Structures are given as C-alpha cells and as structure tokens.
Amino acid sequence: MNSFTYSRAENLETALQEKTTSLEGRFIAGGTNLLDLMKVNVEQPSHVIDIRHLPFNQITGNDAGGLRLGALATNAETAYNEQIENRYPLLVKAILAGASAQLRNRATNGGNSLQRTRCYYFYDTATACNKREPGSGCSAINGFNRIHAILGTSESCIAVHPSDMAVALAALDATVKVTGPNGERTIPFLEFHRLPGNTAHLDNNLDPDEIITSIDLPAKGFAEYNTYLKLRDRASYAFALVSVAVGLDLEGTIIKEARLALGGVAHKPWRLPEVEASLVGKEVNLENLKNAANALLAGAKGYGHNNFKIELAKRAIVRAILQAAKMEDLT
C-alpha cells in the first residue's frame, strides 16, 4: 500500500471541497472495498477523505410514500430496520445474501452500490485490464472467465457488478440522490450503473466529485410476492454466479405487474422492462415463464468457461418467479 494523507470531513461542504481540490482523492466510509483495492495497488489515492460522520445514516420516509435510505446507513442497519422488513422484504433478502455479517455491519448503502468488480484480472496488476488501465486489453475474454458476464459485454470488458443489494434496488425502481459542486440531482437506479462499452473503467454515472447522500425507495415494495434467488459456488460468502430479484403483483395466478432483475450476468444489474410488460395479464405457468426467461437472455454470449451461465440463468428465472408467486409445486 502506498502512503497517503487522511482527513475527516465534518460536513458535506468540506467533503466536497476537499474532493474537488485533491488530486486522486477518494471518499471512504465503510472501506470494505477501497481498502482491499489499496492493498493490492489497484487504487492508489493520494488523499482519503473520511465521510463516515456525515449526517446520512438515517432511514426515514420520503415524499413519494416510500423510504429514504441514508447513504451511510450500514447494510445491517438497513436489513434489520422494521419498516424495511415489513415493506421491502425483497431488499432484506438480497442484502442478507451478500457478504458476511461482519462486512454488513461495516459496509454502507452508498458504498455497496459503488463497489467495484471482483474480476481476477482487475485485482492482478500484472495482467492487462481495461477497467484498471484503459487501453491495455481484457485478459478475461480469453482467460479463465467462469464468473464473468454473458449480457451487455464488449470487447473491452466482460466483468460483472458484484452487488446483491443493487439487484434488488434495480427491481424496486429505486433512485439515487447525489450532491456535487453543481448541486443535487437524482439518478434512476436503472441508469446509475453502466455497461462497459469502450469505457470499461467507468462503473457508473456518478461524476468524479459527486457523493451519494441517499437512496429512495418508491411506495410499492412488492411485500407479498417477492424473492431473491442467489446461485453461487458455496452456501455463504461467495459472489453470485447468477442471481434473480423478483417482485410480483398477482390476482390469483394472473400477473398484474412483474419486476425481474438479474445479478452476476452483466456489468450492471440486468433488467428489461419490456420483458416484464410482456408478462402482464398472463398466467403463472411454465410456458409463460420460460418465454420470459428466453427473452431476458436474448443476445447472451458465453466466453467459454462461463457458457453454462446462459442455461443456468434461464432456469433460475423460472424458479425465482415460481418462488415469488408461492407456486413452486409447478416445477
């Protein structure tokens, strides 16, 4: 780890000013990802600005009738909040499927959305990686790519976004509130993360000097019919090979509204609203669900070691929707 300077921001204005004026400065809150990256020299900030004590750690109501998650509330505080448990059980399931209890006690909601890929080659500074060093190439495309993306990839990058929480937030239509030198703005969660294209080093649409202050949940939480299905190599403390977040509104066995988001398959949580719309008015049965799964995976491309993910994802989608609808006996 290289040497760096440290300061503790006492308010938002100070934090933004320090970030704007410090070359290669980084905000730090929970630090569960940044410190790892600093230890292996992937991140080499000259200055670290501790924002942990800024007043963004509350979970409160918002004007839309939903809830506002403070960016600095921890994942554990969020998962065990009574209102979140009652109104957004899908989010609780996703958070508790991620990391370990110790990490969830430290990791923040804002940091969870900003965590970087766990691609082997991104962490290995002896290999080429466009995400770490733009223009150097992608070692994963012809390398060991079992955990890598099958949707939305480019010749520059086939890494996946690692967050479980982000997949649920995408399904719930959350929005991200940010503040920077030019003031506040709101970003729909579906537009927050990016596909790699030819700018794989950019994970999201946050400007360099902006800071996340909160994440807003809409009023509708799909509390009755929901699930988060995570398929991974071991039962705990592993990133998803494929994950599926599902929220349903049902009338009997007929789908009135559907939300489907996939994790572990793309550079961002993968969601296609047109596929969700195609399910409206249809019965929950295997034929309709398989058609939706095929549509969500349309255009999927394997890179050798990860070819299995395409069929795995299709089966996971069907199973997850049946779980959410409480109709697993149809399998």
Image (tube, rainbow, N blue to C red):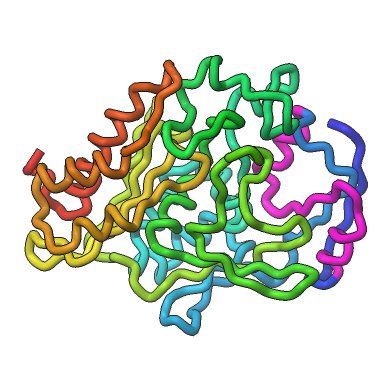
The relative height of residue 26 versus residue 18 in the rendered view (above or below) is: above
Q: Nearer the viewer, residue 214 or 208?
A: 208
Residue 181 placement (x, y as % from top left): 80, 70
Write down the quadrant of residue 207 in the picture: bottom right
Placement of 87 over or under 92, stated as above or below: below
| Vertical order, 10 against 123 (above or below) | below
Residue 126 rendering spot, x and y as whole percentages: 74, 17
Question: Left of 112 or right of it: where is 61?
Answer: left
Is 30 one of the magenta-colored residues?
yes
Q: Is residue 212 left or right of residue 238?
A: right
Name above or below for residue 136 compared with residue 210: above
Q: Position of residue 25 (x, y in %)?
A: 85, 50
Q: Residue at x 92, y 59 (%)?
A: 21
Q: Which sits in the foreground, 40 or 170?
A: 170
Residue that appears at 22% across and 53% down: 324
Residue 51 position in % (x across, y down): 76, 60
Q: Quadrant of the C terminus?
A: top left
Residue at the spot 70% in from the left edge and 46% down from the top edge = 31
Residue drawn where x is 43% and y is 37% of the image? 151
**Residue occupying the far bottom of the picture:** 63
Q: Quadrant of the N terminus?
A: top right
Q: Is residue 100 magenta?
A: no
Q: Name the quadrant containing residue 33.
A: top right
Which portion, as a residue range, is magenta? 14-40
Q: How many marks?
A: 0
